[in-house]
Image (spheres, rainbow, N blue to C red):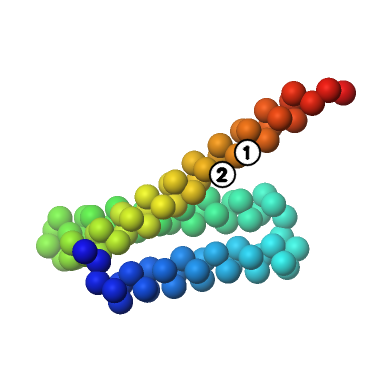
Amino acid sequence: MVAPSLALSGAAAAYRAAMGGAEAISQGAGFGEVLSRAAQSAIDVGRSADAASTNALTGQGSVTDVVLAISRAELALQTATAVRDRVVTAYQDVMRMPI
């Protein structure tokens, strides 16, 4: 089980990341830019999970860090998949509209 302090720090990091996206939207950033930042963030989370796994395999990291990093990467992947599905559905709806 993940320690409560680690779970809270992970939740706080997710909240800060979400607020960063909200700030970008309120400052007039385009949809493409926000989407690009979100994709880059998901890639960075995946890389940090890889690094944590490598550190644990070499004996330099803890299992807790690995589990937390992989959980974050899994959440980022699920979010990206959900966004992709919504975009595809929206595209299909637009294509079905009569002219």
Q: CA distance from mark 2 to mark 1?
A: 6 Å
Q: Residue furthest left?
A: 59
Can you say which quadrant of the picture contains the C terminus? Answer: top right
In x, y percent, where is residue 50? 29, 53
Can you say which quadrant of the picture contains the N terminus? Answer: bottom left
Residue type at mark 1 is Val
In x, y percent, where is residue 70? 31, 54
Q: Is residue 90 left or right of residue 84?
A: right
- The residue lying at 83 percent from left, 23 percent from top is 98
- Circle 1 packing at 10 Å, graded few (<14), some (14-19), many (20+), is few
The residue tagged 2 is 83
Camera-side residue of 61 and 8: 8
| Labels 2 & 1 near each other (Cβ < 8 A) | yes
In x, y percent, where is residue 87? 63, 38
Q: Secondary structure at mark 2?
A: helix
The residue tagged 1 is 87
In x, y percent, where is residue 73? 38, 53
Q: Is residue 71 left or right of residue 42?
A: left
Give the label on residue 58, or none: none
Camera-side residue of 87 and 98: 98
Can residue 46 be seen in this snapshot?
no
Q: Quadrant of residue 49?
A: bottom left
- The residue lying at 23 percent from left, 55 percent from top is 53
Q: Secondary structure at mark 1?
A: helix
Q: How many marks?
A: 2
